[in-house]
Amino acid sequence: MCMVEELVRPYQNRAWAQSNWVLVRFWHGSGFGFRHRQWPHLAARYGDREPTVNNLGAKVDAGLMSQCFGPCPSEVIQGRIRDYLNDHQKEAAQFLNSLLSQLNWAFSEFFTMMQEMDRVQIDAHLEPRHIKLCATCFDLYHGLARALEMTLALSPELLTKSESSDNQNELLLGRTCQILMAVVSRICVRGGGAAGFRRLVARGLPDTDRVHYYVALAPVAGCLIRILDPKLPQD
């Protein structure tokens, strides 16, 4: 339980990226559209290659990637996380608040870098470092979104019951919906920035092959399903 307590400590003022990656490893295989060794759009194009190989065939740094191994979810650890979140309402609310803040930051950074790259018409004029940072922010976004999906699946009462979230359930529900809708708007709505995302996907730049509609939207769908799950009909 000490390990679980460390993993779900608030993400402020600490190195949180690797902790979040560990949480995602425990969830990989349980999430919505998150049961593949390789992303479907990449498997269709390149076959079942190593997820740590980019679209130019070069090895990439897997340190921040949220999917660099096959799915192997841990129901035992998931159960321990559920128990901790349910038994420590104040800490659970702090963790979810910090997770939402980092998710908002990661997606905002990705979107800003994507817009800057979109203004550069010639691929050769783009700095490799800028491309890598953009791809890294997208990886961070996806990992954080999967951690959010896991949190909502294991402890949905954080958004619905005041006694389960230190009387912050309405705030947490509002923030969650706001961030999820912001992602949908910027990925899917033409006036919200979707054109830039479409062009980035089509450019095929090094290290950006994971930037895809499926990867961006599957965790959002998973979060929405977890929020609505008690209200969905059995069929």
Image (cartoon, rainbow, N blue to C red):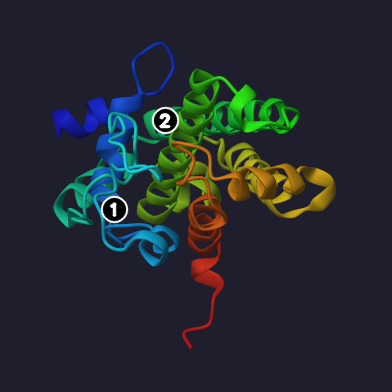
- Taking depth in this image into account, of 150 and 61 the one nearest to the observer is 61
Left or right: 230 in relation to 7: right
Residue at image mark 1: 28
Where is mark 2, residue-wise?
Answer: 95
Secondary-structure class at tag 2: helix
The secondary structure type at the circle numbered 1 is: loop
Question: Which residue lies at the image location 68% right of the left edge and 31% below the top edge?
Answer: 122
Q: Would you say 138 lies left or right of 52 here?
A: right
Q: Is label 1 or label 2 in front?
A: 1
**Residue 203, percent from left and from top:** 60, 44
> Which quarter of the rendering shows the N terminus?
top left
In the displayed orientation, state which residue is furthest to the bottom.
Answer: 235
The picture places residue 132, in percent across and down from the top left corner, at: 47, 26
Pick the residue in front: 14 or 67.
67
Provide residue 75's location: percent of width, then percent of height. 18, 56
Q: Is residue 122 left or right of residue 189?
A: left
